[in-house]
Amino acid sequence: MGGSDALTHLIEINGLAKSFGPIQAVRGISFTVDRGEVLGFLGPNGAGKSTTMKMVAGFLAPSEGRASICGHDVVDDPIAAKRCLGYLPEGAPAYPDMTVVSFLDFVAQIRGFSGAERRRRIAAAVERIELGGVLHQPIDTLSKGFKRRVGLAQALLHDPEVLILDEPTDGLDPIQKHQVRTLIQGMAKDKAIIISTHILEEVDAVCTRAMVIAKGRVLADGTPAELESRSRYHNAVYLRANGGLPQPLIDALAALPGVQSVEGTGRVQDIGLYVLPNNGQDLIAPVNEVVARYGITLDELRLERGRLDGVFRDITTNAA
C-alpha cells in the first residue's frame, strides 16, 4: 500500500452512472477524495448515495464511468482496490449465527492475517470499537447499535487507507455516536473517508467537505462552512433582551441598509429576534449602534453561521 503515498487522489470517480432498467439511480457523478479528507454524502432517500458507494466499493458494477481506489480500478483490478478499502454497507450485514469474535477472526483470515498478527488486529479493533462485552454473543442477538459497531470493526480491521461508511452511526445512542465520530476524526488525517449520512450535525462534526446529491446528480460540493454561507441565516444577528425588544427598536433595525428582514425565531418561549442580512453582509456594528441608541441592555447577541438544514432543503427541493 506504500505506493499510494505518491497519489494525489486516493479515491477517483469519473462519470459514474447506474441504471436499473428504466430507472437512472446515478447519473454521471465525478469527484475525487484526497488523504486527510472526510467527505459527507448528503441527500434525501433515493438520491443515489448508497448506490454510488456500492459502485465505488466495487460491490455494484457501474453502467458507465470508472472508479479507482489508491490507483486501482475497482472493476479491472478489484482485489488490489479492496485491499486498500474498508467498507461498511447499509444495514451492516454479517453472519448472524457467528459470535462477534468468530466473525472478526473470519474477516481477519480473509484479509490474509494469521497467527499473532491476526490476534493483534482483532484485539485492536475490539478495543477501538468497544466490543469486549459482546465478543462471545451471536451477532443475531445483538442490538442494532452493536451490529453497526461490529460492521465498523470489520471495516477497520486491516487499517485501510480508504474508508467508505454508509450511515456509520445509524442505530447508535448519543454516547456511541460521539465515540464513532471521535474515532473518525482521529483516523482522518491518514485516510480518505466517505460517509453517507442524513444527520446534518454529523457533517458539521466530522466532515471536511460535504456533497449534496439528489436524483442521482451532485448538486453542491464544498466545505460545511461554504454550504452554510448559502443559508439566508448566514451572518444573521440574533439578539435577545429578557424584557423583550420594543417595537421602535425593531423598526429601526428593519430600516438599516443591508437588512432583509427582522424575524422571530419560531421557537416557543424564545423572545429573541433574527436580523437577516442581504447577501450575508456583516451587520454586527450597525445593529450594535441601533441598540445603543435605544439604551437597551441585551442578554444575548450572536452571529449565526448559517443553517445547513435549510440549505440542504433548498438545494434538494429545487433539484430538477
Image (cartoon, rainbow, N blue to C red):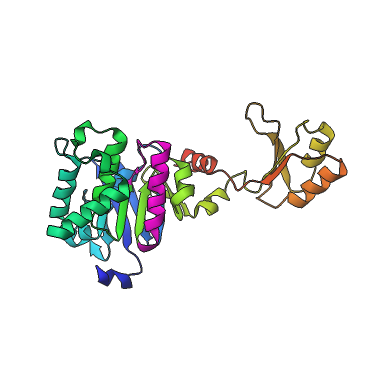
Overall secondary structure of the magenta section:
helix
What residue range appears in magenta?
166-190
Q: Tell me, yes or no, whether the highlighted magenta stretch contains residue 188.
A: yes
Q: Residue 179 at what x, y percent from top left?
A: 39, 46
Name the spot of residue 163 as percent of width and height, x first: 31, 54
Q: Is residue 195 above or below residue 95?
A: below
Query: How far across and down, in percent of the image, does residue 239 sit?
Result: 72, 40
- Quadrant that contains the C terminus: top left
Examine the rendered structure and indicate whether residue 146 appears above or below residue 5. above
Q: How many dots with numbers?
A: 0
Find the residue positioned furthest to the top: 268
Residue placed at 62% from the left, 43% from the top? 233
Residue 62 drawn in magenta:
no
Closer to the camera, 132 or 194?
132
Q: Is residue 142 visible?
A: yes
Measuring 23% from the left and 49% from the top, which residue is drawn there?
154
**Camera-side residue of 228 and 154:** 154
Left or right of 63 on screen, residue 102: left
Q: Is residue 201 left or right of residue 59?
A: right
Q: Horizontal and vertical percent for residue 16?
A: 30, 53
Q: Quadrant of the N terminus?
A: bottom left
Residue at 41% x, 48% y: name it: 181
Q: Is residue 76 visible?
A: no
- Residue at point 79%, 47% (across, down): 288
